[in-house]
Image (tube, helix red, strand yellow):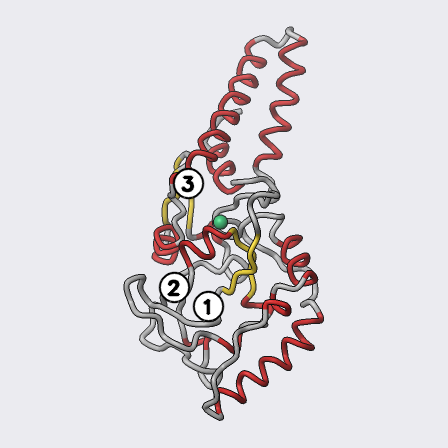
Amino acid sequence: MIRIIKNSKCPKILTTKGADQTKKDCDDYDAKRKLSKSKRSIYASTAVKQTLVRAHYSKCCYCEQKFTASRDLAVEHFRPKSGVKQTRGQKEMKPGYYWLAYDWNNLLLSCDECNSTYKDTLFPVATKYRARSHHGNINRERPLFVHPVLQDPRDHIRFHDDEPFHITEIGRVTIEEIGLRRSGLREAKLKLIKRLRFYCKVIIEAEKHPRSRRLQRLATGAKEFLREATLPDAEFSSMAQDLLSGWSI
Ligand SMILES: [Zn+2]
């Protein structure tokens, strides 16, 4: 996970249609009326998705896989909108954080697997207190998932080779519950590590043979590849940063 910086302003649809729908949902809750299903056409509108894609460098905010034609992107509600669970085995509590369904601070971007298969409506908090309606106060909660906009994930999760490890309790819960050690991810990460190691060897060889123009040329390309692998828009860049920080290149 890397830090996400939402430089762009909140998309207008959230402060217009989203705000209207939130008011209606809160009124329905107070009047004990059934809450309507959150509207995808608002929270996952093109304007919202495009703004999120830019801020997230086209990557899942949890596993850092790049979005491709075959890997869809999902607008992720950090606090689940329709229901919530403290633990995976627990029965889902209804309603969820309905009043945050169109809240810009609650919207992230993730892959389907992190969003639906793993996180789903799970949202553990370390506090006894949990806001159960729009009359509650979410600032009294201490979520056990890393919020990549409000926190720097690098303070909570680091890597030994492809393996993420936790520095804090919220790092541990995030790794375990969002499946950041899953085999599908491991395979893709190991492929990248193989390439990174190969380019490191090229650089070391070039240092041993300073007169070889061919090796010097290859080393220039290798250094560029390694540099780009650590940039925030690169797939698995947090892993690459940790790997390369331990290598002398
Ligand atoms: Zn993901």
- Say whether marks 2 and 1 touch (CB < 8 Å): yes
User: For mark 1, what is the residue?
Assistant: 80
Pointer 1 or 3: first along the chain: 1
| Residue ID at (60%, 43%) | 68
Pointer 2 or 1: first along the chain: 1
| Residue ID at (58%, 85%) | 24
In the image: residue 231, left or right of residue 185: right
Residue type at mark 1? Answer: Pro
Residue type at mark 3? Answer: Phe
What is the number of the mark on residue 159? 3
Residue type at mark 2? Answer: Leu
Q: Relative to residue 97, is residue 245 depicted above or below?
A: above
List x then y, in percent, for residue 5.
61, 57
List x then y, in percent, for residue 7.
67, 59
Q: Relative to residue 162, is residue 108 depicted above or below?
A: below
In the image: residue 183, left or right of residue 28: left
For the residue pair 244 and 35, the one nearer the viewer reads as 35
